[in-house]
Structures are given as structure tokens and as C-alpha cells.
């Protein structure tokens, strides 16, 4: 595995159009795009479970400045995730690969006001959203709901 891992992590072998598809050519998407491209390369080589963190622990934990933080963070993941899904599909790997995207857990619908914060949201353990793609998952299915 040591020699196989070195080859799987060598992104210089990827064509420029693939690197761009993951956002490796843009500062905002380069870090997560690199992680997603490595994930595809590992899946392609038979690795059965790959977990990809978009950023450091707690980065999405926006108890303050939620709009600013989440706007920036969404920009950093949108293109790489799209690139991963498109790339898996064009290689015929999406049919047998389950992609699960989730965050730490839900956010309350109202603004958080403790500690002087007025622009963040607290955790909401009763409302949590994930999405899945590939591996025969039926599109457009919603399971569960929260109240108003």
C-alpha cells in the first residue's frame, strides 16, 4: 500500500481540465478540491471508505458571523463537490460509490443571542440535513421533517 498510496496522492498526473473541474486553480477551492480529487483517486484504486473533511474542525461552527462564514465556506466546497460527482459519473464510478455529504448538525432557525452574539445560530439537534448521491440512491427523496 505504501507505493500505491504515493502514486494515488500524485495529482500532477491529472490533466489540467480535471484539476480545474475540482477548483485546484482557485485559492478558495484548492484545499478542498485537492482532498476531493484524492478521494476520487482512492476510490478508483479500490479503497472502500474515504472520509473527506472540507476544513479544520469547528470551521463551520458559526455561533457568530454565520452569513459571512457560511458564504465563504460554501464557496470553498461547492465546486469541488460538483467536480467529484461529475468525475465519478464520467468514470462510471458513481453507480457503485455512495457519496454522503453532511455537516456537524443542524442550526436553529432563529438567531443566537447568548454571549452578545446577534449574527450566529446555535445547534439544533432535532433538525439535521444530509444529502446522498450515487450507488442507486433515488433522487428527490426526503425522509423525516421538522416542525414549523
Image (spheres, rainbow, N blue to C red):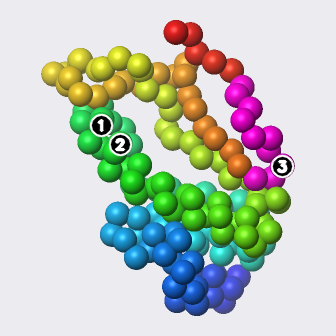
| Residue 117 magenta | no
Real-space Cα separation, disc 3 to disc 1, in angstroms: 34 Å
Q: CA distance from mark 2 to mark 1?
A: 5 Å
**Residues at circles 3 and 2 in contact by the CB criterion of under 8 Å:** no
Q: What is the residue that sits farthest to the left in this orientation?
A: 116
- Name the residue beneath numbered marker 3: 136
Label number found at residue 70: 2
Quick one: label 3 or label 2, which is nearer the N terminus? Answer: 2
Give residue 30's quadrant in the image: bottom left
Q: Are marks 2 and 1 in contact (CB under 8 Å)?
A: yes
Crowd band around label 2 with a 10 angstrom C-alpha radius: few (<14), some (14–19), many (20+) = some
Q: Residue at x 68, y 53 (%)?
A: 99
Q: Which residues are magenta?
A: 134-143
Residue 2 at what x, y percent from top left? 65, 85
Q: From the viewer's side, name the closer residue of 64 and 133.
A: 133
Residue at image location 26% in from the left, 42% down from the top: 68
Q: Is residue 20 above or below residue 95?
A: below
Label 3 element class: loop
Q: Position of residue 59 (x, y in %)?
A: 36, 47
Amino acid at each position: 500500500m505504501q507505493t500505491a498510496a504515493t502514486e494515488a496522492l500524485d495529482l500532477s498526473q491529472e490533466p489540467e481540465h480535471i484539476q480545474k473541474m475540482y477548483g485546484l486553480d482557485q485559492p478558495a477551492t484548492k484545499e478542498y478540491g485537492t482532498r476531493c480529487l484524492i478521494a476520487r483517486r482512492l476510490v478508483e484504486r479500490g479503497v472502500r471508505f474515504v472520509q473527506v473533511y472540507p476544513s479544520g474542525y469547528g470551521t463551520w461552527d458559526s455561533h457568530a458571523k454565520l452569513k459571512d462564514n457560511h458564504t465563504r465556506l460554501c464557496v470553498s466546497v461547492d465546486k469541488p463537490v460538483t467536480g467529484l460527482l461529475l468525475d465519478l459519473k464520467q468514470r462510471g464510478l458513481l453507480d457503485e460509490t455512495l457519496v454522503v455529504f453532511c455537516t456537524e448538525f443542524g442550526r436553529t432557525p432563529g438567531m443566537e443571542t447568548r454571549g452578545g452574539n446577534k449574527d450566529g445560530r446555535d445547534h439544533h439537534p432535532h433538525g439535521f440535513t444530509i444529502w446522498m448521491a450515487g450507488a442507486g440512491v433515488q433522487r428527490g427523496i426526503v425522509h423525516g421533517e421538522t416542525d414549523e
